[in-house]
Image (tube, grey):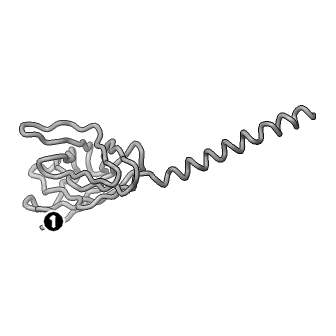
Amino acid sequence: MRRRALALALALPAVLAGCASASSGTHAAAGAPRLSVTGAYIPLPSMPDMAAGYFVLHNDGDKAATLTGVTSPGAQSVSMHQSTASTMVDLPTVQVPAHGTVTFARGGRHLMLMGLDPAPKVGARVELNLRFDDAAPVTVQATVQPLTYQPGQ
């Protein structure tokens, strides 16, 4: 019986030290990414079941974040792409720097929404769910705009 009590007494400081390090991990989360989205829109598509999506992704946190994908309940699939001079390149992930922004805009990074149902109409809102491997998901409503829409004007 005394041996068990002695073993517990010797193990207690190690257990408490483990609890202390776990709580310091919680404190480290204060430096986590803080993500938000502004200016989300989808130009009225010329094809009823396919559209592009644009937005600005902000990270006000002290740690970078990795955007790993986007889904939408109104689309069969959503993929991230980068336009180049002659083609589109698939982007499996997008890095969002600490205290930085990443812009998804015409002629650059953008989303491709495939299999839209129903077909978007001007003024409609399309839900976009952004997933990250090191931060909580972000959900945003992108407004369908006329094809001639220019953000910031």
Count up the numbered dots: 1
Q: Residues within 10 Å of mark 1 (few under 14, many from 20)?
A: few
Camera-side residue of 60 and 56: 60
- Residue 75 at x, y percent in the picture: 26, 48
Check the image and report above or below for 58 versus 123. above
Residue denoted by label 1? 152
Check the image and report above or below for 147 versus 63. below
Element carrying mark 1: loop
- Locate residue 87 relative to residue 1 in the image: left or right: left
Camera-side residue of 107 and 61: 61
- The part of the image, by quadrant, that contains residue 66 is top left
- Residue 62 at x, y percent in the picture: 40, 52
Q: Residue at x 66, y 42 (%)?
A: 18
Q: Residue at x 21, y 44 (%)?
A: 114
- Locate residue 129 relative to residue 124 in the image: left or right: right
Return the residue found at the far right.
1
**Quarter in which the N terminus is drawn:** top right
Q: Of the residues shown, which amino acid type is indicated by label 1?
A: Gly
Return the residue found at the far top.
3
- Residue 69 at x, y percent in the picture: 31, 43
Q: Residue at x 16, y 60 (%)?
A: 121
- Residue 79 at x, y percent in the picture: 24, 42
Camera-side residue of 102 and 89: 102
Camera-side residue of 132 and 2: 2
**Quarter in which the C terminus is drawn:** bottom left
